[in-house]
Image (spheres, helix red, strand yellow):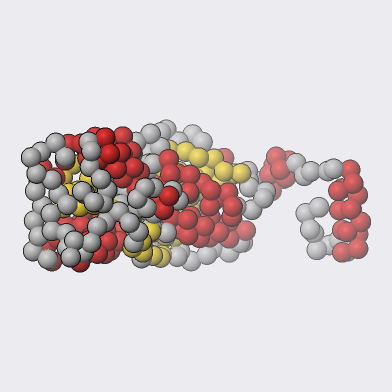
């Protein structure tokens, strides 16, 4: 049943046929005791309570479940909780990092010599496999697209303070404005927390003044849902009265009304490559050299930004 090379193929086939007939299922707990494996992978997010949108969480978990070997199970955890006592039970760890504050936790994993892959945020150390997206270039490119359509008066609903993606998307947005000699009214800049409710509140605050922007950048698609609803509640049409673009290209984005112009962050691809790399590390008797990869996001043009030219 363990595919031993000491057993002839004919014998293996006979035994497996009998096992199938009897409905035999290998006991992974017993197998784990024998070879000192738990067959459990820990997946850790920066913060499951604040800042990690349900859409992002679902997409990452879905890709992991689609690509994990059948003998393994997954445990979903939050880095901000006390996890030191449970780390011994994992064969390997995926860290979906959003903040520099995760660095201490990453250090702990390295010290424990656990197979480890860090996803989502580019980290400085070179001894850990790391897959991420270039958040800066994604935000800069989509902002430049809106500028090319004639927009000069922008609003901005930024993400949760302390997250690397918040800083990178903000920098890309502001650099695009600077390169075109555009300024932004401070009253048009509000902070959200990547969740729809915060996008709703921020957009209502932006529209409460005597003037309004022609186009608003929401730093993720979940906040965009709330922002579009706020526009509707206040009698503004998107994009006829105010244009909106988001970031992430979540699976629902093309089904919104209007279909959302956004940035496709390759979250699924990053999660898929991450779990495949980790399981490759777990299956290998030799140490695999760390892999570093930063993937460019792609602007997705739909119907939520009006052409003012």
* Residue ID at (23%, 51%): 240
Decide which of 99, 300 is in the foreground and name it. Answer: 300
Does 76 sit above or below residue 298? Answer: above
Residue 9 relative to residue 75: left or right: right
In depth, the one of 172 and 226 nearer the eye is: 226
Which residue is more in the foreground, 222 or 260?
260
Percent from the top left, x then y, of residue 205? 17, 36
Residue at (80, 59) in percent of width and height: 4
Residue 60: x and y in percent read 48, 49
Name the image quarter holding the C terminus. Answer: bottom left
Residue 284 falls in image quadrant: bottom right
Picture coordinates of residue 14, whole percent (x, y): 92, 56
* Residue 161 visible at all: no
> What residue lies at 63% left-to-right and 47% top-to-bottom?
72
Residue 93 lies, in percent from the top left, at 50, 48
Depth order, front residue of 264/6: 264
| Apparent side of residue 70 relative to residue 221 in the rendered image (left or right) | right
The answer to whether residue 141 is left or right of residue 206 is right
Q: Is residue 50 above or below residue 126?
A: above
Across the whole image, how many numbered discs are drawn on residues?
A: 0
At 40% from the left edge and 37% from the top edge, which residue is drawn?
48
Q: Is residue 5 visible?
A: yes
């Amino acid at each position: 049943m363990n595919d031993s090379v000491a057993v002839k193929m004919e014998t293996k086939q006979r035994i497996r046929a009998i096992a199938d007939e009897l409905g035999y299922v290998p006991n992974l707990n017993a197998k784990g005791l024998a070879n000192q494996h738990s067959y459990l992978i820990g997946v850790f997010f920066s913060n499951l309570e604040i800042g990690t949108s349900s859409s992002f969480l679902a997409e990452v978990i879905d890709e992991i479940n689609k690509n994990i070997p059948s003998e393994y199970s997954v445990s979903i955890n939050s880095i901000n909780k006390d996890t030191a006592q449970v780390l011994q039970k994992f064969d390997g760890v995926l860290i979906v990092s959003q903040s520099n504050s995760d660095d201490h936790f990453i250090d702990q994993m390295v010290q424990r010599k656990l197979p480890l892959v860090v996803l989502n945020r580019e980290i400085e150390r070179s001894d850990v496999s790391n897959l991420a997206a270039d958040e800066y270039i994604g935000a800069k490119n989509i902002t430049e697209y809106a500028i090319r359509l004639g927009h000069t008066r922008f609003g901005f609903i930024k993400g949760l303070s302390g997250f690397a993606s918040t800083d990178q998307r903000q920098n890309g947005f502001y650099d695009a404005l600077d390169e075109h000699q555009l300024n932004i009214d401070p009253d048009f800049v509000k902070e959200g927390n990547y969740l729809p409710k915060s996008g709703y509140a921020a957009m209502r605050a932006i529209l409460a003044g005597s003037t309004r922007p022609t186009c608003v950048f929401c730093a993720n698609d979940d906040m965009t849902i709330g922002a579009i609803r706020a526009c509707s509640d206040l009698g503004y049409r998107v994009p006829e009265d105010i244009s909106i673009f988001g970031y992430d290209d979540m699976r629902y984005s093309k089904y919104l009304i209007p279909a959302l112009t956004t940035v496709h962050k390759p979250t699924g691809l990053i999660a898929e490559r991450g779990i495949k790399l980790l399981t490759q590390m777990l299956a290998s008797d030799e140490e695999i050299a760390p892999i570093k990869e930063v993937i460019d996001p792609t602007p997705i043009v739909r119907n939520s930004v009006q052409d003012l030219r």
